Image: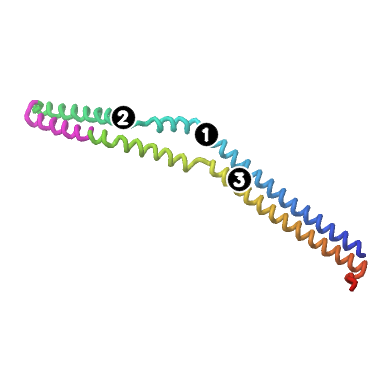
Amino acid sequence: MSWFAVGAAAVTVVGGAISSNNAAKKAENSEKRNLAFAEAQYQDWLDAFGSVQDNLSDYYNSLTPEFFEARNLEAFEKEKTRAMDNLRIGLEQRGIATSGLAADAEADIEFASASERAKIRAEAPMRVAQEQLGFLQTGLGVNPASSVQQVLSNQSVRTAKQADAARAEAADAASAAVDTTFDVLSKKFGSTPPTTGG
């Protein structure tokens, strides 16, 4: 009967270790699946947006105030020319194309145009910075690399917790086995403590 108790204690220790090991393997497999899924999502994102991202990055990084200024001045001049042409046509239709009224209207438009060109030039550096900041914020908001990092971080935390739990279970099982073995041996060989001669 006493060796049966020792055997039962050993089975308990081995069973606890196997159970702990099985739980750790299940958790590890789950983490591997989560990581594979996050990596696949990240790769899909790179496949879909990678080259677009590079192209956009090149575009936004190459933006200069001079480029922005030239583009906006060109668009403004086209609109101003169209407005001037419409004004001249309207004045000609009324027969006052060469009047003082026509000259005053053109002078007002030229003054307003000079003011608008100065505004475009002054705002160009700030507009470039806003465009680049918008691109950066978009990139930070949609890049799934953080999902992969989160899965890896979760795995690390879980693995550490599992290792701690497994060590605690193994220590408890070993302690129980030692206690059981000691109890059995004490009963078998007597529980009288040895005496020291005096």
Q: Secondary structure at mark 1?
A: helix
Q: Nearer the viewer, residue 181 or 14?
A: 181
Magenta-colored span: 98-117
Res. 1 image quadrant = bottom right
Instruction: Report the residue at 60% width, 38% height from top.
Output: 40
- Quadrant of the image occupied by residue 132: top left
> How many neighbours does mark 2 have within 10 angstroms: few (below 14), some (14-19), or many (20 or more)?
few
Q: Which mark is residue 152?
A: 3
Q: Position of residue 87 (x, y in %)?
A: 16, 30
Q: Secondary structure at mark 2?
A: helix
Q: How is the image coloured?
A: rainbow
The disc, 2 or 1, on the residue closer to the chain's N-terminal end is: 1
For mark 1, what is the residue?
A: 48
Vertically, is 119 above or below 173?
Answer: above
Residue 81: x and y, percent? 21, 27
User: Position of 8 compared to 107: left or right?
Assistant: right
Q: Mark 3 falls on what kind of element?
A: helix
Tag 3 or tag 1, which sits nearer the N-term?
1
Query: CA–CA distance between discs 2 and 1?
Result: 32 Å
Amino acid type at mark 1: Ala
